[in-house]
Image (cartoon, grey):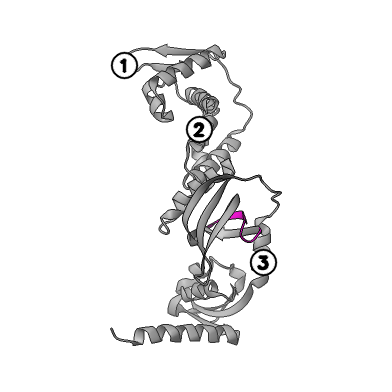
Amino acid sequence: MKIDRLVSIIMVLLEKERIGAQALSEMFEVSLRTIYRDIETINLSGIPIRSTPGWGGGFEILSEYKVDRTVFSSSDLATILMGLGSISTMLTGEEIVNTLAKVKSIIPTEQAKEIELKSSQISIDLSPWRGNANIHTYLGLIKTALQKQRLLSFNYSDRYNNISTRTIEPYQLVLKDNHWYIHGYCLEKQDFRLFKLSRISNLEMLTDRFIQKDFNKQLSEFSDTMTQKQKNIKLRIHKSIMDRVLEYCSYDHFSQDSNEHYIVEFPFIDDEFGYNIVFGFGDKCECLAPENIRAGIKQRVQNMSDIYANEF
């Protein structure tokens, strides 16, 4: 929208001492003629912009024009920049770039280095080391559908690999335990459902718009259900995988068993995902109790052994 672009241009000009028309044209993906019209509109609105021709020239806001930049403290600005920076690793888009420009524009020059240092002290990178290449694309498409209130259609594979076609009204993107989910109203089930993005394929944004329902579903409801299913099992682990096990529980779950081993009260959900977590610890881990979980692990190990017992 033009008004968004005008505001963004103002913020860019506040941030930079001088910027050329060509740079603005490329930044906002519009023609030079459009940029010149935008600058004229900003001038007419009462914000004085000076144009300097020639090499090194460009547009700049007159230094006499003052903007109150004292609304936020340096710590506030550092926290905002840190949060925006973490979001931008996964959710790209012009609005995030514009928001970053707006925030940076209100940073007093004398505090710029201090705020930059504070904002870089904690780095939150949500992008995966590796994984499903579609997820990044899907995030952008879902974000657009959320903003435009458009229906989403996709194929969904459940934990048993049963595939169904779903159409949903999207309401919320959720990042939980390094996994992305979309919370939406499923037209097939006539209820709110949580869908894991890694199980989605052929995602498509439809032209149909929807009228938003009252949405008061919180992620805590999903977490409460998972907590109810969870129970502790007893593992004996080698000290070499202690750091990996600590990703799922704290030090107070550990007790020394020998110089080389620990006994761990490990939080576990009795499904394939839970078993796969335990298998991920390899031969450095043994399930001691309860017996039904130990038997479940033994059966899965036997099934795997049978597969590899057959020669090609």
User: Residue 234: x and y, percent?
Assistant: 58, 80
Above or below, comparing residue 166 to residue 300 in the picture:
above
Query: Is label 2 in a helix, a strand or a loop?
Result: helix
Magenta region: 180-190
Q: Residue at x 54, y 15 (%)?
A: 47
- Say whether residue 33 is left or right of residue 102: left
Q: Which residue is mark 2?
A: 98
Q: Position of residue 111 (x, y in %)?
A: 53, 30
Q: Which residue is mark 3?
A: 225
Q: Give coordinates of residue 146: x percent, y percent.
A: 57, 45
**Amino acid type assigned to the residue bearing label 3 in the image:** Thr
Q: Quadrant of residue 225?
A: bottom right
**Side of 304 relative to 154 (left or right):** left
Q: Is residue 79 magenta?
A: no
Quadrant housing the C terminus: bottom left
Residue position marked by numbered label 1 in the rendering: 55
Q: How far separated are the C-alphas under marks 2 and 1?
A: 27 Å
How many C-alpha atoms fall within 10 Å of the one at disc 1: few (<14), some, or many (≥20)? Answer: few
Mark found first going from the N terminus, 3 or 1: 1
